[in-house]
Image (tube, rainbow, N blue to C red):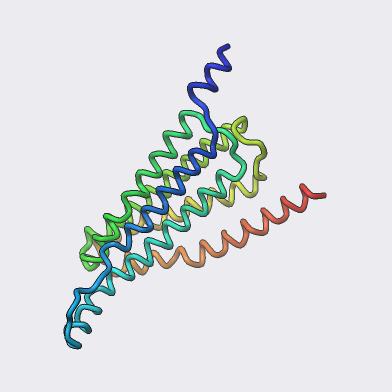
């Protein structure tokens, strides 16, 4: 009876949480583009000026779209093996979704005030906290093997943790760095490009090897 009560009250299908997650990610990505636009009826000189003015918003949109898409991809990889969720997983999942939904705000700050230390620090902190949130969710799921029908190998788990930790660390370091040099902090973000590529390729190889082993 106790076991049935726990399942009924604290656990549910992972499909529902994943469906909600997809909706939140999609809405957040859409909201990023709402501030991008040009006034109508501009003369050629005004058009050129307005186009130059809107470019920071375009670049901020592109950056945040890539960031959110990376978290969405990682979220789906994480839930690939999960069949059920409990109260802790739901709370951590909702926390992460709340942070994702908030991303249009620091994106607007970055677009409008990208040369100010506070704006770069807020954006960096927002991404770092998202990384920490997803890392906490990952750890929570790995400590609850009864929620999954199968589980990735230990090497895959470690690689995924390193990927999330790298994102959180790079953006966390950028927070104090932004108060020294906003431009330097934004350039520092680029450190993630080779790191993510190496970890991503390694993760693909490990997953392919695990799939081959399972098929054998």
Residue 17 lies, with reference to residue 30, above or below; the image says above
Q: Residue at x 33, y 52 (%)?
A: 126
Q: Count all numbered tags in the image, as a single digit.
A: 0
Please tell me which residue lies in front, 153 or 174: 153
Residue 21 lies, with reference to residue 107, above or below; the image says above
Residue 18 in picture, x, y percent from top left: 50, 43
> Residue reaching furthest top?
1
> Residue reaching furthest front?
41
Residue 135 in picture, x, y percent from top left: 47, 44
For the N terminus, which image quadrant?
top right
> Residue reaching furthest right?
216
Q: Residue at x 54, y 33 (%)?
A: 13
Q: Quadrant of residue 116?
A: bottom left
Please tell me which residue lies in front, 66 or 30: 30
Residue 182 lies, with reference to residue 176, above or below; the image says below
Q: Residue at x 48, y 51 (%)?
A: 164
Residue 53 is left or right of residue 149, and the answer is: left
Residue 78 in picture, x, y percent from top left: 55, 46
Q: Quadrant of residue 105?
A: bottom left
Residue 89 is left or right of residue 82, and the answer is: left
Residue 170 in picture, x, y percent from top left: 41, 57
């Amino acid at each position: 009876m106790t076991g049935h009560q726990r399942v009924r009250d604290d656990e549910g299908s992972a499909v529902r949480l994943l469906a909600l997650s997809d909706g939140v990610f999609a809405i957040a990505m859409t909201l990023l583009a709402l501030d991008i636009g040009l006034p109508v009826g501009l003369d050629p000189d005004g058009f050129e000026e307005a186009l130059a003015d809107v470019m920071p918003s375009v670049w901020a949109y592109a950056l945040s779209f890539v960031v959110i898409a990376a978290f969405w991809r990682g979220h789906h990889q994480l839930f690939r093996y999960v069949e059920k969720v409990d109260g802790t997983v739901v709370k951590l999942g909702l926390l992460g979704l709340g942070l994702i939904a908030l991303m249009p705000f620091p994106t607007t700050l970055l677009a409008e005030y990208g040369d100010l230390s506070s704006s770069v620090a807020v954006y960096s902190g927002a991404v770092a906290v998202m990384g920490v949130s997803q890392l906490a969710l990952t750890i929570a799921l790995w400590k609850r093997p009864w929620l999954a029908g199968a589980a990735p190998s230990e090497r895959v788990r470690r690689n995924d943790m390193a990927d999330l930790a790298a994102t959180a660390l790079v953006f966390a370091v950028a927070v104090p760095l932004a108060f020294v040099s906003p431009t330097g902090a934004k350039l520092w973000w680029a450190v993630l490009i080779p790191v993510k590529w190496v970890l991503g390729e390694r993760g693909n190889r490990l997953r392919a090897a695990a799939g081959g082993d399972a098929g054998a």
